[in-house]
Amino acid sequence: MDYEKESLRLRRRGRVCSVITYALLGLWALIVLFPFYWMLLTSVKSYSAYNAEYVPSFFTLSPTLQNYVDAFTTVNLARYFANTVIFTLATTAIMMVVIIFAAYAFARLDFPGRDLVFGLFLSLMMIPAELVVITNFVTITNWGMRNTFWGLILPSVTSVFYIYLLKENYEQIPEELYKAAKVDGTSDLKYLFKVMLPISQPTVVTIVILKVIECWNSYVWPRLITDDETRFLVSNGIQEIRENGFGRENIPAMMAAVVVISVPLIVLFLIFRKKIMAGVSRGGTKG
């Protein structure tokens, strides 16, 4: 009897803990998802209805898609969307080539001063991003690359953090595989592409996705380096929509544009979320 009572007590305690846990998780989910709901809600409110609200309304009885039309007609959002795709794909592709070879050199090649150079690389992460932006702006301007895609792309084609993350992942691959490959006459380049990259696929995919998100959301640098509308990215387009309201900020149209440009990132994350989790956990685990 005592055993049954204790077992029942433990089961009740477990149920209570589960209820509390799920309640807290549900509350946290509401807090996290509310900004997305508010963004979507605002995007289907009419311009006049939104401006007539003295107290924000959490629902609307007359949704409209006119804001999505305005988002593409007020400014050339389709062009900005295409520019962002080009910028994102080109930057990510070039960066992956750079970091894959750099991480391999630091992880497997033995050259004088390797640890010192890598330490200096890591020290660059201590430099404030604002100082780097100033340096990049002066350099790109002196090279005559303002209002060009190369001016947008070049400052973002490498990342010390991603090199570090991929290097740590490479170093988890047993050294015996490398020695066996060298005995078989395999070149370093072939070993990299045939052995190391397939094993490191989760981390590589994670880096690609994080870089795509970073480029897609880029605001400060595109806003700073270009004032030519033919080179604007979606971040510039959203700002234009906000400034082109009919005497006031056109927030509903801006929210509609944000919804449109957020969809690709949400879909990308939902498709590759498991690989992102696996890549981050693998890159942060030694042994």
Image (tube, helix red, strand yellow):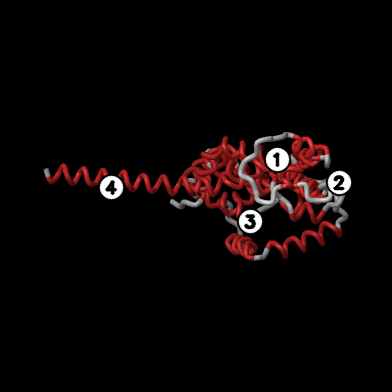
Q: Which mark is residue 13?
A: 4
| Residue 47 visible (yes or no) | yes
Q: Which residue is mark 3?
A: 160
- 14 shown above or below 155: above
Q: Can you tell which of label 4 and label 3 is closer to the viewer? A: 4
Under tag 4, what secondary structure? Answer: helix
Residue bearing mark 1: 45
Quadrant in which the N terminus appears: top left
State left or right for residue 16 relative to residue 190: left
Badge 1 marks a residue whose secondary structure is loop
In this view, 127 is above or below 255: below
Label 4 vs label 3: CA separation? 48 Å
Q: Position of residue 14 (x, y in %)?
A: 30, 45
The x and y percentages for residue 139 are: 81, 60
Mark 2 vs mark 4: in front: 4
Q: Which mark is residue 125?
A: none
Question: Which numbered disc flags the more N-terminal residue, 2 or 3?
Answer: 3
Label 1 crowding class (10 Å Cα cut-off): few <14, some 14-19, many 20+? many
